[in-house]
Amino acid sequence: MSVVLDASALLASLLDEPGKDQVDAVINGAAMTTVNLAEVVGHFAKFGADRAQIEALLRGLPIIYVEPDWELALSAGLMRPTCDPAGLSLGDRLCLAQAQRTGARVLTADRAWKGLAEALGVDVELIR
């Protein structure tokens, strides 16, 4: 697993937005936390999709879903002082913590992450 996807990256792919090609090139075997998956589900639910529609859209994706454990939660929590000034959420920090833990690069559309990459020791790639 060499890539971790932020919710914004997967949404770019699913919604045919700029950055889609970058995500599609690495999606096979990419990782995503289940918290970031919940953010994607929430996006579609907000705009009226029901559970069956959302499951049909997401079920077959070749992504490895990572459930937060003690170590990931601890790492994400410790990132808060660094990430709060940039407005990053818990989901954002869990995504970054997963990339930090595995040494993978993280794909996101969130420009604020790039400024935090060095401080967190994470390789952040902006998709647009």
Image (cartoon, rainbow, N blue to C red):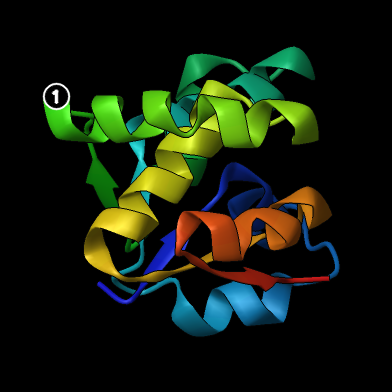
Report crowding for label 1: few under 14, some 14 to 19, many 20 or more residues within 10 A (C-alpha).
few
Does any portion of residue 60 appear in the rendered image? no
Residue reaching furthest to the left? 70
Q: Tag 1's secondary structure? A: helix
Where residue 33 sits, quadrant-wise, is top left
The tally of labels here is 1
- Left or right of 45: which side holds 92? left
Query: In the rendering, at what x and y percent does residue 81 appear?
Result: 58, 27
Residue nearest the viewer, comparing 15 with 64: 64
Does any portion of residue 27 appear in the rendered image? yes
Residue drawn 46% across and 48% down? Answer: 96
In the depicted structure, whether residue 35 falls above or below residue 7: above
In the depicted structure, whether residue 32 falls above or below residue 94: below
Residue drawn 41% across and 36% down? Answer: 94
Query: In the rendering, at what x and y percent does residue 7 appear?
Result: 59, 43
Q: Which residue is mark 1?
A: 70
In the depicted structure, whether residue 68 falls above or below residue 124: above
Query: In the rendering, at what x and y percent does residue 17 appear?
Result: 83, 62
- Left or right of 83: which side holds 78? left
Where residue 37 sits, quadrant-wise, is top left
Residue drawn 50% across and 36% down? Answer: 93
Give, as a three-letter code, the residue at label 1.
Answer: Trp
